[in-house]
Amino acid sequence: MKQVQELPGIVRHALARGRTLLGQHRLFATAAAVAALPRVLAMLGYEPALLVRLDSYDYLWGAARLSPNLINVSGYSVFLWLLRPLHSLAVITGVQHAMGLAVAAMVYALLRRYGLPAWGATLAAAPVLFDPGQLVAEQLIMADLLAMTLMMTGLTVLLIPRAPSWPAIVIAGLLTGASATVRPTALPLIVLVPAYLLLREGGWRRAAGWLRSGLALTAGLVPVLAYVGWFAAVHGTATLTDSDGLFLWARTMSFANCAAIRPPADLRALCPGAQPGVLARYDPSQRPPPFSYLWDHDAWQWQHGQPGHVTGTAAFTPANNGRALRFAVRAIEAQPIAYANVVARDSLRSFAFGNSVRFPSGQPSTATMPAADQQYTIGAILAYAGNDQGIGADLGGGLATRLQPPFATIMHYYQRFIYLPGPVLALIVLAGLAGCLLARRRSAEGTFLWITAVILMVVPTAEHEYDYRYILPAVPLACAAAALALRRPEPSRSPAISSLKWEIP
């Protein structure tokens, strides 16, 4: 006790405040402490990280050279550049695991602010705390976790104050806009946040609503326009990437029928029947998934590209991207019902049993990577960290890491028993929908969170294809929306939370 009294006053105050918070939120603090354990096991069992071909290496190369990538937006590379002086992939994953716990804490704080009991708010945060898909996202050198953190931070800043102040609106707009430079699927947030503020302030007839909405929209556009300017300065085109049209074209291959589309002569080479091998199957149900069309190097977009050191980018030129976008728009206009059907079908896969992201159960194979890709992957890690991080021999295939027993073995069994089942996720989404539709349960915040979650789940499938990893940023929003729908219709404010003075002055 005497040692504590000898500490500076500000430190003593911080320690006392920390003890008070832990006492008030003991249940969540205990859950978060338990959730830290599988994160430590993941870091020890999959060293130094999980790396996906070839996106992870693109992000590392972009951080080493600080340049925008042609295929993926490079906001995540900027984040990696900030951590580059530490020369460690393990540091990246450690920071990301801390960010995952922070996202769970924001879900908890937001729900406590709106009157949920500690057990309800902790339960809503449980998927972020314990789901192995979430843990994989944190262990991956990929952009999903950073996008989730930026989105959740922006929405928390916006929703926790009783009445969002002007600084809070600006910060929320900047953070949601920044998330779009990490994952473009977050772009709808730039419009959703202003729409929420407009409705919250009484609709279009009130000037205050328009002013707040306009401020949020302007703040959200700032990071996006800054990124577009950076991309234009480096590559000469004012856009986020040179890939959006090609990704959407690959999506249309799931249903496209050129007899219905009637493309002009310069687009006929993009028809399914003009593609090589199995890609040319007439029956859409028998065709490979969209990524096969995008990455088959015998397809039209790869025929005249000039490969460079950054492998796998030769097809992504402004001309190819524009051509692909023209075909995709024509296909969707000619077959809107077929397009809606494939998007709905693939989006519903999120709710199937066993449809999740899992840690590898065995050492990934290194035998399937071409020599050029192998050279690039090692070069990207060397450029970023200064050495191969001890996994030079483990780079290959679709996933790279080095499994370390017994920690990887423990995680293998962990994910067999603890995970978020697809049907449970479906119930969570349905509970949030009920909150939107039932007047007795309806709240502006819950409706906003539910709409945002659903859009974030559907947009990646509509733009390219389904991957469970893409929907992970929507899970905390869906859980928060469901929790708000299930709360008491007129809850009393939690004194423990209100005493924290969340409002931003």
Image (cartoon, rainbow, N blue to C red):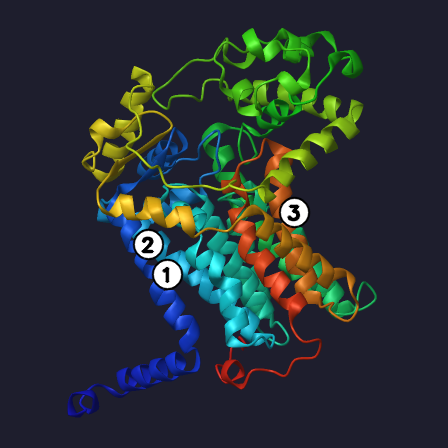
Which of pointers 2 and 3 indicates the residue nearer the eye? 2
Residues 209 and 146: in front is 146
**Chain-order first, disc 3 or disc 1:** 1
**Callout 1 secondary element:** helix
**Chain-order first, disc 2 or disc 3:** 2
Determine which residue is flagged by label 1: 35
Residues 43 and 10: in front is 43
* Residue 130 in which image quadrant: bottom left
Residues 262 and 326: in front is 262
Q: Is 462 situated left or right of 373 in this image?
A: right
Q: Residue at x 52, y 50 (%)?
A: 473
Determine which residue is flagged by label 3: 455
Residues 404 and 393: in front is 404
Determine which residue is flagged by label 2: 39
Q: Tag 2: Cα neighbours inside 10 Å, few (<14), some, or many (≥20)?
A: many
The number of discs equals 3
**x, y percent for residue 42:** 30, 49
**x, y percent for residue 180:** 54, 46
The correct choice, above or below, for 352 with respect to 417 in the image is: above
**Figure quadrant of the N terminus:** bottom left
Q: Residue at x 28, y 52 (%)?
A: 41
Asked whether disc 3 touches disc 1, contact meaning CB atoms under 8 Å apart, the reply is: no
* Residue 498 in which image quadrant: bottom right
The residues tagged by marks 1 and 2 sit, at their Cα atoms, a distance apart of 7 Å
**Callout 3 secondary element:** helix
The residues tagged by marks 2 and 3 sit, at their Cα atoms, a distance apart of 29 Å
Three-letter amino acid code at disc 1? Answer: Ala
The correct choice, above or below, for 414 with respect to 378 in the image is: below
Three-letter amino acid code at disc 3? Answer: Ile
Three-letter amino acid code at disc 2? Answer: Arg
Asked whether disc 1 touches disc 2, contact meaning CB atoms under 8 Å apart, the reply is: yes
User: Residue 89: in sight, yes or no?
Assistant: no
